[in-house]
Image: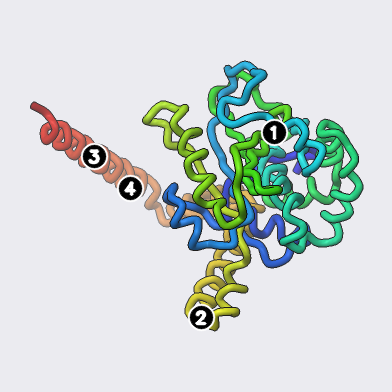
Amino acid sequence: MSAGWNTIESDAGVFTYLIDNLGVKDVQFEELISLDSDSLKQLSPVYGVIFLFKYPTTEKPTEQAKDGNYDHGAAENLFFANQVIQNACGTQALLSVLLNKDDEVEIGPKLKEFKDFTIAFPADLRGEALSNSELIRSVHNSFARSSPFVDETQQPDVEDPDVYHFIAYTCINDTLYEIDGLQPAPISHGSCTPTSFSDAVIPVLQRRIERYPANEIRFNLLAMVRDLRVRARDMGDEEELEREDKKREAWMWENSLRRHNFIGFVGEVLKGVVREKMQAKQYDAWIDESKTRTEKRIEEARKKGKAGIDQVGP
């Protein structure tokens, strides 16, 4: 890993264990497949949502928010930090919820110390403090997918059309806020209470998605909720508790795989297979058989494609 901030995935298991490692207690993330308030309500209590979308790099800054209103005064009364470094927006988005919910969530001594240290800072200095936090950066980077082909010290091309960004939505002081470190202030979307959050945030998300072409589907939404194992224990639901425990085990396994790249391993396996085939004098036959199978699959795929065209044609 580099000394900077590496890219992490928008994944419930990644975000859940990331905040666990920061010292947060009894909080997890759940991916939302459908954009409806009923699905979100089933996860109550919901502390906020993290939204991933394709960032419009060609848009120019405006004095007015495209939806909602900039609340510059709120930036002094809640935790809001400008994003000053690449690749940190996922962790910054989840902290934008957690550090504004420390009256509801046990955020742990390290994050509490960080919030207390930065509470009097303006938004730009809070962003600098976040980017320079060794604890937050190291935990963030520990969940980056390892790749031997990516130079993590290389800054991304600002003209790259495929740039993605995380933002947060949460209810603070009876107001629904959109918290985006690339904006000059939190964006107010009107009155909201913790119980009405699900009904209030879904229309805002729908309007945001409607800004994009109808064929754009690259969005992801994660809900920050109370640990579902706690709810299962409180309700005495042993089956639900078992499902959640198995989910955690699967997340741990997936996260352990993310920390490794398997290029070298795959290369060694392939060399071993080639060596075995050559020793058995089967190498040429093996190559010919592989070519035949590949050509057969290509031909079958071509026939299926032709059949599909014939079925939808005039």
Q: Is residue 74 left or right of residue 298?
A: right
Q: Can residue 300 be seen?
A: yes
Callout 3 amino acid? Ala
Dot 4 or dot 3, earlier in sequence: 4
Q: Do the CB atoms of the residues marked 4 and 1 lie less than 8 Å apart?
A: no
Comes first in the chain, label 1 or label 2: 1
Disc 2 is placed on an element classified as loop
Q: Which residue lies at the image location 60% right of the left edge and 39% below the top edge?
A: 190
The amino acid type found where label 2 is placed reads Asp
According to the picture, the residue beneath numbered tag 3 turns out to be: 301
Q: Name which residue lies at 14% across and 37% down.
A: 307
Q: Which mark is residue 237?
A: 2
Task: Out of 79 and 215, give the one closest to the viewer.
Answer: 79
Label 2 – label 4 distance at C-alpha = 58 Å
Q: Give the amino acid type for the residue marked by disc 1 in the picture.
A: Asp
Question: Along the line of sight, which residue is nearer the eye, 49 or 20?
Answer: 49
The percent position of residue 242, horizontal first and vertical second, equals: 52, 77
